[in-house]
Image (cartoon, coloured by chain):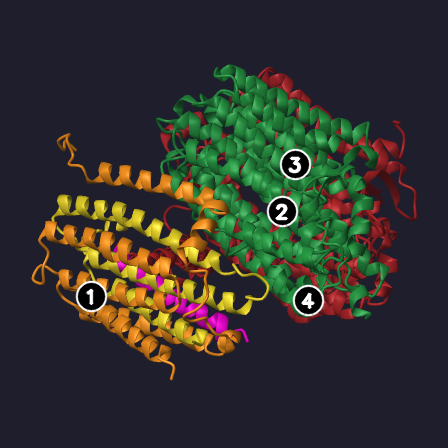
Chain colours: A yellow, B red, C green, D orange
Amino acid sequence: MPINYYLFLSLALFTIGMVGVLTRRNAIIIFMCIELMLNAVNLLLVAFSKMHHLKNLALNASVGTDGQLFVFFIMVVAAAEVSVGLAIIVMMYRNIHSVDIQFLNRLKH
Amino acid sequence: MFSFPNIAYFIPLLPLLGFLVNGLGRKHLSKGAIAWIGSGVLALAFAASLVVFLNLPSGGPTLLNAFDFIRIGELRIPFAFQLDALSSLFLLIITGIGFLIHVYSSAYMHEESAEHYGRYFAYLNLFIFSMLLLVMGANYVIMFIGWEGVGLCSYLLIGYWFRKPAYTQAANKAFVMNRVGDLAFLIAIFWLIARTGSVNFVDLPAALSSLSSSDITWITMLLFVGATGKSAQIPLYTWLPDAMAGPTPVSALIHAATMVTAGIYMIARSNLLYTAAPLTLNVIAVIGIATALLAASIAIRQNDIKKVLAYSTVSQLGFMFLAIGAGAYGAAVFHVMTHAFFKALLFLGSGSVIHAMSGEQDIRRMGGLKKVLPITYFTFLIGCIAIAGIPPFSGFFSKDAILLSAFLKSPILYGVALFTALLTAFYMFRMFFLTFGGTFRGTDEQKHHLHESPLAMTLPLMVLAVLSVIGGWVGIPELFLHGGERLIEFLSPVIPVVEGHAISHSTEYLLMGLSTGLVLSVIFFAWTRYRQYRSEESSAPFARLLENKWYVDELYQTAIVQPLHRFGGWLRSFFEPKIVDGLIQGVGRSIRYISQQIRLLQSGQTGNYALWMVISIVVILSIQFFVRK
Amino acid sequence: MIALLLFLVPLIGGLLTFLPNKSGMARSLALGSALLSLAGVIAGLTLFKQPLYWEFDAEWLQTLGSRFSLKGDAMGMLMSLLTSIGVLLAVLGSWNNDVQGSNRFYGLLLWMQAGMMVVFLASDALLFYFGWELALIPAYFLCSIWGGEKRIAVTFKFFIYTFVGSVLMLIGLIYLQSLTPNHSFQMQAFRNLEIPESKQVWLFWLFFLAFAIKVPVFPFHTWQPDTYEQSPTTVTMLLSGVMVKMGLVAMIRWMLPILGIGVFIWSDVVICLSVIGILYASLIAIRQDDLKRLIAYSSIAHMGLTVAALFSLSGFSNNSNVVLQYHQVGFQGILLQLFSHGINILGMWLLADRIERRFGTRKLSELGGLARTAPTFTIFFLLIAFANIALPLTNAFPGEFLQFNALFHAQSPYRFVFLVLAGLGVILSAIYTLNMVRRIFFGETNQATENGLRLSTAECLALSLVVGLILVFGVYPQAVLDFTNDFSREYVKAIDITRFLAK
Amino acid sequence: MNVTPYIFWFLSVWALFSALMMVTSRNPVYSVLWLISTFFAISGHYILLNAQFLAVVNIIVYAGAIMVLFLFVIMLMNLNKETEPQKNRWLKLVGALAGGCLLLVLVAALKDAELKSQQAMVGAGSIGLIKVLGKELFTRYVVPFEISSLLFLSAMVGAAVIGKKEITHQNS
């Protein structure tokens, strides 16, 4: 497949995630949108890894593994991030009984 | 060291020494010591001046170079003294009359405490020092130093009784008005430096060729403005009557005999320039005669004995400027000399009267003092006759010389000058009769106190009276005495004698007879009128106008002082804080306002931050990809 | 070596002064440092006059093209003398003041001196800028900690104001550095630059604003009266006696020789501003009731004249010796006035401080009659006041005389107007100064002034020093003029823009 | 006939549609479900690209573990359509517009990029296999791998600390 297709698909997914972040007020949904954005990036990474693999197959049979391993690490980080993030959201809910980020305006003061 | 010309150094240094000793030691010295030191240095200075006068070589001036005051490249302003006929004559007048007045002061000021007594003599000595600098200076800058110095001393002495606000106001007024003139003087000096590169008097003849006629006109005009300040001419004369706030001997010394004649001296010094500037001479003549007339008219209706004398001084100075305007510098200097004698005499006499009257200065409350103050009466009479111009008293010869020069310049000037001379005789004798004639009109307490002044005061009066009689004889015209006009001849190295406009003897006799006859009749008129003065004089509108000095002070006040004052206040309380500072503060305030507005963007909402981030990313990427191509 | 010492003595002295906590100790240390630097300057002026002793050069921020080079020319020497005298007088004048935290106070004071020394002696632009800020920042702290009630707002204004100027100047300096062939900050490299007219036209303002704010030139002066009023008088002495001269010295050293064409183009505007400033400040001073503000405005007026005279030097001589001669005359006057005005205003502040401390007021309307109750003080005040109105035989007269002369020779069609208007300042200065004298010293005493005022030995010493200098240089200004003669002759050649016009 | 493009298009449309639904649904629970659906589509892409390991991990870790966590949290808080806070309409519009612009800019910037002609290897290649990746992971990437385990540990501790109920009563 032309790499362009993957590129645009990832971009579209990424942007959808971004729009979600911008338009929603629910912290959990925003969090999920961020996951979506990460996944869009993951997809692109895999696509590029395969692109490089195809291109440099003759030189080195294992070219492109880095990209996929990178995706793996991203997932690791994402998982850790989700656990901490959700813990924060739970705590926030416990304190202000809402997950509306509108109330998180402490930065103003 | 003690021989000519080096002895001249002592002339200014001695009063300076007196100033330092009296000034620094005023708390430790006794009054007697102060008076002796103050007068002693003057006596020595007078002796030194005499030595200079007698040893003066004929011909060119003798220059004494002390050190370089300012020397930058080609520009050289030495601290130098110039000894010649003109300056040596002035030296004699200043130190001589100065000495007499110091002696007089030692008695007149005796009621002051020792500390203030010392202060008084220190100021007086400092004044003499400055005046000597002015006269001896070999260039305009040194002259200017003395010029400002005498202004300073005048300021200090007018405000000598500093507890009275009116006196210190008068002192300020005198200084500031003098400063106006000084500014013009300074600009004239700059002009001279710019065109000729030198300010020395000895370079003037050579410099004349490098000056264009407009340059000369400007320079002479500016110098003349400077002279109007110091010599109390229109428009800068109003300070002089106010300056009578100072002690009377000060008025005699500074505001009659010496300082106020500095303007005449300066112009006589620069006579080469003035001769080359006919326009300026005309202006000077007009200003001089106008001042003389104006001041004389005011003097008629003044009742303060010192104010009358003050206006008379302004008027006499006007005469001197008239002489200068007519090109008769010698006559002007002659009148300076005789005027110094009789005006000092009159002021000191008035001081003696005031002394006797326990400080009373209003002539309406005097009268009949003839019997109690015989010496004062007699000497005062001599002074009055001298100023009125009756032969053979000194005033006659000098005034006659001026009238003659005015006649040669223009008959109209002569007419006005003659009229002014008659006014002079009138107001002087009005004052004389009011003071000494008739019966005493003061309080009983004053009457009880009346006494003739001590010898230290009457002796100077007598000396001056003698001088007032004979002082004019050095300038007896050729008409009466062959080989007369010795003064003009003596001054000829400095002031070239202009030949060629002699008039016939008969005309000259006629003019003299006319003026003498008219003066005598005016005196008679004054005698009939004021012999038995009793009550207020009529207050016709014109008389009130004169009494109020033509409202010139009020005019200055409303036209110049008040607006400036108000403008300054407006600047201070409105323009500065609101406009200038307001602009600066406005910058600060607008920045604060903008920050306030921008602060609202910081809603604290993470969502908004994210939005801004995205928008910024879009913008940056757009620039990155599409603009920078 | 001397030059370096003059920087190091106050710097180390300041550091040492910070250490002790006892007030007497700090005071003595400060006095010692002040005396030491004065001794250094005097030694430098008499025994070690050769340039060898007054030059110092070491590596410093090499990557930026800046070297730690100090070079004392005649002006630098004169100004460092003034600085040392100023600091000495400041310390003496505050000898009996009970300053809270005097170790910090004197420490900062000495650092300020170190900064000013660098400004006056630096021949490297970045070093100069360093000194400029080093002098400013201690001043800021001194005013904002020990000042009057409104000190915070006022010092803030002062700081922001001068700092804006400094930043503009820094931009200008960096730009000039980028123009030099080997990217150097050295003064000589700057002077060798041939900057096209189109650039000079705006570069001028970068520098001029910085210096004009410091001097200050109308209409950038509004920080000054406020700051002088609110600062502790000791600091005000240094601010007005020495620090404002930084602006002028900077103009002389970093503007006229480098941006000659720009200066010439704008000289009419600047002279006009200065002359307006003279009249404006004088008129305000006439109506001023606050002694310190009055002196501040008077200082603005005097500095206005100096700036006007300085900018009237700019122009082309066509290599005519006559013109150069007149420029030199004017420039000598400016140098003389820099020194004299510093001395006079220092004395003026000493007196104002004494009055304020003794009577607790600066209002002229609340004073009066002091001439009777405090005669010695009156004499000092009168002498310094007369120096303030440039009476002959005081040191201000030759300076003003020569400056007016410079104005008379300005290459401007309006020079005569400028001269006359600036001359009106002379009259106005007499009015406000004498008014001040009259209202403080003459008239009747009131309750406050009834008991008079006694001067302590330290104060007498300080005032005698001032008065002595006033009279000595008033009678014999040639002492200074001789000293600066060669420097000024070279300088007027250096600022002559004929060489640019030839191309 | 090559079936790959069809699969690609199908998966793409699926992913985009699910993603859009995720963003737009009012009810958070639906959002979670739609996101899981998106992940499945993405895993499909991975399989298409012969990245089997990642496809599996994606399903297990993301769709399985993480999303279940989300679901739990949502249910724990009892969030539903009614409690869902709504943003200002204008802000929504602006947000969407900004996102759209970003997409536009990126697409416009990348459409002429050099990679246009490049192809991604689809359905072949061995690098995505567990054997290959595992070998790499435990040889060259062993240090990062161990560090990531540390990261997990600290995340676990962190989550526990943050999530535990505060024992001390609030006295501030």
- Viewer-nearest of discs 1 and 4: 1
Q: Are marks 1 and 3 on the same chain?
A: no
How far, Cα to Cα, is label 2 from label 3? 71 Å
> Dot 1: few (<14), some (14–19), or many (≥20) neighbours within 10 Å?
many
* Residue shown at the point (85%, 48%) measured from the top left: B490
Residue C97: x percent and y percent? 47, 22
Q: Which numbered dot is residue B385? A: 2
Give the residue at mark 4: C412
- Foreground residue among B400 and B145: B145
Question: Residue B619 in magenta?
Answer: yes
Residue A103 numbered tag: none
Q: Residue at x 62, y 56 (%)?
A: C172
Judge whether D162 appears above or below C207 on screen: above
Q: CA distance from mark 1 to mark 3?
A: 74 Å
Between marks 2 and 1, how big is the CA–CA gap? 129 Å
Q: Is residue B237 visible?
A: no
Q: Secondary structure at mark 4?
A: loop
Element type where label 2 sits in the image: helix
List x then y, in percent, for residue B23: 62, 25
Q: Amino acid at mark 2?
A: Ile
Quadrant in the picture for residue C363 = top left
**Image quarter for residue C468?**
top right
Q: Chain of mark 3?
A: C
Q: Nearer the viewer, residue C480 or B599?
A: B599
Mark 4 closeness class: few <14, some 14–19, many ≥20 residues within 10 Å = some
Instruction: Tell me the kind of residue under disc 1.
Output: Trp
Marks 2, 1: nearer the viewer: 1
Circle 2 chain: B
Which residue bears the numbered disc 1? D34
Check whether the beta carbons of the residues at disc 3 and disc 4 lie within 8 A of each other.
Answer: no
